Amino acid sequence: MKIGIIVHSQTGHTLSVVERLKERLTAAGHSVEIERITPVDENERGLENVKFEKLPDISPYEAFIFAAPVQAFSVSPVMKAYLGRLPALNGKNAACFVTKSLPFSWTGGRQAISFMKNSIEAKGGKVVATGIINWGGRGREKEIAELLEQFSKAF
Ligand SMILES: Cc1cc2nc3c(=O)[nH]c(=O)nc-3n(C[C@H](O)[C@H](O)[C@H](O)COP(=O)(O)O)c2cc1C
């Protein structure tokens, strides 16, 4: 299956997980591309004002993974702005995950996933897996291993 991984990563954490995910899914026989969405200004907080260096053409992909950091107790404004401009997903499968640094799921993880899930479903996508990686936690490696396992089974 041709899978597009759309990632926003400000400091590289989320990108590093996405790279491992690509390796894992490729080994399972999928064709995987990482599409990094880069804003012109990382600090722009007005969603309608976020401008991107370039937006990927997602039409060739049969399934998607969306990944981003938690910022200010939800998914990053950059990913929010991107999801708002996402073309129709026409029933395609999608998974999403976030990385975060503060402990406890109430510091933005659940809110971020809920926002991403609602946005994907609003565009007609079917959410098949979600994940939250706590970057500062001692269980980080285990969480990443579980996410790789869960996501590779979902496609
Ligand atoms: C502006 C900003 C706001 C953040 N807000 C939160 C937050 O509300 N909750 C949290 O758990 N982590 C928060 N973080 C930490 C990031 O989510 C975490 O370091 C993440 O792994 C960064 O991913 P990246 O390297 O892919 O950008 C914030 C980081 C930044 C830069």
Image (tube, helix red, strand yellow):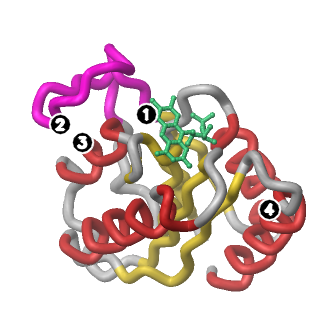
Task: Name the residue carrying label 2.
Answer: 47
Amino acid type, mark 2: Leu
Asked if the residue under mark 3 is in contact with the one under mark 2, i.e. CB atoms within 8 Å, the reply is yes
Q: Position of residue 78 (x, y in %)?
A: 34, 36
Give the spatial CA distance, label 3 vs label 1.
11 Å
Q: Position of residue 32 (x, y in %)?
A: 65, 55
Residue 53 seen in render: no
Task: Name the residue carrying label 3.
Answer: 81
Magenta stretch, overall SS: loop
Task: Name the residue carrying label 4.
Answer: 144
Amino acid type, mark 3: Ala
Q: Nearer the viewer, mark 3 or mark 1?
A: 3
Give the spatial CA distance, label 4 vs label 1.
22 Å
In this picture, which residue range is highlighted in magenta?
37-55
Within the image, what quadrant is residue 48 found in?
Answer: top left
Identify the mark nearer the N-term, 4 or 1: 1
Q: Nearer the viewer, residue 143 or 15?
A: 143
Q: Position of residue 116 (x, y in %)?
A: 36, 64
Identify the mark nearer the N-term, 3 or 1: 1
Task: Name the residue carrying label 1.
Answer: 37
Identify the mark nearer the N-term, 2 or 3: 2
Amino acid type, mark 1: Ile
Residue at the spot x=67%, y=31% of the render? 12
Give the spatial CA distance, label 1 vs label 2.
14 Å
Q: Nearer the viewer, residue 10 or 30?
A: 10
Outermost left residue: 48
Give the spatial CA distance, label 2 vs label 3.
5 Å
Q: Is residue 44 left or right of residue 74?
A: left
Residue at the spot x=38%, y=77% of the render? 92
Identify the mark nearer the N-term, 3 or 4: 3
Q: Report if the beta carbon of the residue with label 2 is closer than 8 angstroms to ligand 1.
A: no
